[in-house]
Amino acid sequence: MNRPLIFPFFLLTAIILAGCGGTDNAADDERRQAEERDQIVEELDPEQETTPSNPSGDNKLGFVRYTKEQVENENEEQHNINIDRTSLANMITRIILRNEGFTEAATLVTDDKTLIAYDKEDDLNAGKAADIAKKTAVSILPGYFDVYVSDNATLINDIQSLHNSSISDNKYDNTIDQIIEQMKQSPQGNEE
C-alpha cells in the first residue's frame, strides 16, 4: 500500500469511529434520560402502592400529585379522610402546657368540636390564657371545628369522664352540650 494513502485512511477511520461513538453516547443519554423521567413519573404516581426507599422518612412528609383528569375520573367515595383525634388532642395539650402559666390541661376532640379545660397559675390573666388555648387548637385543627376553652379545672375531670364513658349517642351529645355551656361561662379568647 502506498504510504501517502495510509495516513489519510487511518485518519478517516478514526473520524468515522469517533462519530459513531458519539451517536451511541447520544442515544444512550436519551435512553437514560427517558428512563429517569419514567422513574420519576412512576415514583410520583399516587395510585402506586410502593414501599418508600427511605422507610424512616415515611411519616416525615406527605405528598401527592394528580392531574385534573385523574381527579375528575375517580369516585369521590373512595377517599375518606381519617383524623386521629387522640393525636390532635395530644398535640394541642402538649403545646398549651409549653406556655408559661399553665399547670394542667385536658383536650377532647370530637368530630366537629374541641373542648379544652386547663388549670393555670394565678398570675396568668384569664383572657390571655383562654386566647393561648384557643389559638393553639385553631392553629392545629381543620377550620370547621368549634373550639371551647375553660380555666375551670373541675371540667378536666368532666372531659376525662366523657372520654372514658360508654354512653349512648343521644346522652353523649347532651353531656357535651352541658359541658360546653359550662365552658362558655369562662373567657373564650379573642375572637378574630
Image (cartoon, rainbow, N blue to C red):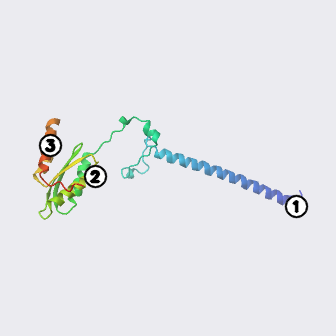
In percent of width and height, residue 121 lies at: 13, 62
Q: Mark 3 vs mark 2: which is more N-terminal?
A: 2
Q: Is residue 113 visible to us here?
A: yes
Front: mark 3 or 2:
3
Label 1 sits on what residue type?
Pro
Label 2 belongs to which residue?
140
- Dividing the picture into quadrants, the one containing residue 19 is bottom right
In this rendering, position of residue 142 left or right of residue 107: right
The furthest residue to the left: 154
The tag on residue 177 is 3
Q: Callout 2: few (<14), some (14-19), or many (20+) C-alpha neighbours within 10 Å?
A: few
**Residue 145: image location, x then y, percent:** 25, 46
Residue situated in front as seen by the camera: 184 or 46: 184
- Mark-to-mark CA distance, 3 and 1: 105 Å
Tell me the residue at 43%/39% (across/down). 71
Earlier-in-chain disc, 2 versus 1: 1
The answer to whether the residue labelled 2 contacts the one labelled 1, judged by CB atoms less than 8 Å apart, is no
| Comparing labels 3 and 1, the label whose residue is closer to the camera | 3
Asked if the residues shown at circle 3 and circle 2 are in contact, with their CB atoms under 8 angstroms apart, the answer is no
Q: Mark 1 points at which residue?
A: 4
Mark 3 residue type: Asp
Say left or right for 90 vs 161.
right
Rendered-image quadrant of the N terminus? bottom right
Q: What residue type is labelled 2?
A: Ile
Query: Judging from the image, what secondary structure is the residue with disc 2 in?
Result: helix
Local secondary structure at mark 3: helix
Helix, strand or loop at disc 1? Answer: helix
- In-front residue for pair 168/179: 179
